Amino acid sequence: MTIDQILILCINVLLSVGALGLLILCLLLLVETIAALFPLPNQPSVDNWQERKVVVLMPAHNEELVIDTTLKDLIPELKPQHRLVVIADNCSDQTAAIARSTGATVIERHNLDLRGKGYALEYGLQYLESEPPEVVIFVDADCKVHPGAIAQLTQQAIATGRPIQGVYLMEKPQAPTPKDAVSAFAFKVKNLVRSSGLAQLKIACLLDGTGMAFPWSVIRSVDIASGNIVEDMKLGFDLTIAGHKPMLCPQANVTGYLPQQTQAATSQRTRWEHGHLETLINYVPQLLQAAWQQKRFDLLISALDLCIPPLSLLVITWSVLLASALLGVLLGASWIPASLLAIAGVFLLSAIFIAWSKFGRTDLPLLQLLSIPVYILWKIPLYLKFLVKPQKNWVRTDRN
């Protein structure tokens, strides 16, 4: 066998493996999207849930601009047996004073060496240990909890004994750009479409950081004290491996707000995307190992689902592989990788179109679909930065 033949063989093998892997991920994305079209069954109601001991924990780091509005929306949803505890974490502004003025219990944490939301939440849980509640609900200080969400999260956590994630979506700024519209749609695909599909398939959904409810015994079964920049994803996989699969509560809605300033938006997306990729690298091997040891097929699917990168990166990866496969054909390589990638492209585009048709029309009008390539180009430097200098430390997004 000549050197040229060996080279072509290596190209065929590499491209075929990459194409087959991408085909599997795009097929899983399509299956999740189709499954999301079917309504989820309603969870049974719980009698006297208002009398159960429930605590809402709200970590807050320099949130004086937004916390008052968040608390005033949240407090009317609480019942007499419920408590609201705000963790003013390394604050240098009026966050603690504003929270106290609304009637919330405020505890202050000062530790500049251990920074991050995970450490703040652990501090709050330790505060509750002397008189633990039945259910703990995590809510961020910069989001809107919609009416009925606390009740739905509480009842489902009590009824199932599992971690519960509400539907957490992003609202566009007052003067949205096409990039904002695409970003809101991509967020909805991840947090609503794919999570709904996973729920239909009886697979654990991701935890999204806010609007999450946990039975006390469940949340204390894992260690959440960390500076991980996507501590919610980490917590979700730790719980899943431990046998506590998070499930979606579609009736509980929580809304966040996309930053209007370009620098803040870039900072936020960098933290999300780098955190997702770092979690992918760290947790896929753990999920596969646990799937083998525990003989759990759901963990295998969770590992594959985690392998699906953010939509922009998935499209970029598919485009690069397809271009490489076509170039390989010109050099004498097989058509098989290009054919597999063509099928993967059909799966990918079908999933995006179905998700947009059913869930994304209000966020992304038809004409703004043309801005998707611009959005993808905006994300390329972010992914390249991950290869050179990935973000490791938690950074708070600047408020408008």
Image: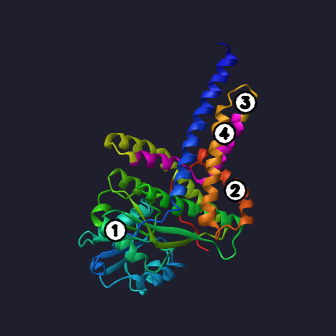
Q: Amino acid at mark 3?
A: Val
Q: Residues within 10 Å of mark 1 (few under 14, many from 20)?
A: many
**Mark 3 — residue?**
329
**Mark 4 — residue?**
321
**Mark 1 — residue?**
157
Give the vertical position of 210 relative to 277 (above or below). below
Q: Which residue occupies 29% across, 58% down?
A: 221
Callout in the foreground (3, 4): 3
Tell me which numbered mark, 2 or 4, is placed earlier along the sequence.
Answer: 4
Disc 3 is placed on an element classified as helix
Callout in the foreground (2, 4): 4
Tell me which numbered mark, 3 or 4, is placed earlier along the sequence.
Answer: 4
Tell me if residue 332 can be seen: yes
Mark 1 to mark 2 CA distance (whole Å): 39 Å
Mark 3 to mark 4 CA distance (whole Å): 12 Å
**x%, y% of residue 190?**
54, 59
Q: Which residue occupies 53% across, 52% down?
A: 31
In-image side of 338 versus 93 (left or right) = right
Q: Amino acid at mark 2?
A: Trp
**Quarter of the image containing the N terminus?**
top right
**Quarter of the image containing the C terminus?**
bottom right
The image quarter containing residue 246 is bottom left
**Mark 2 — residue?**
378
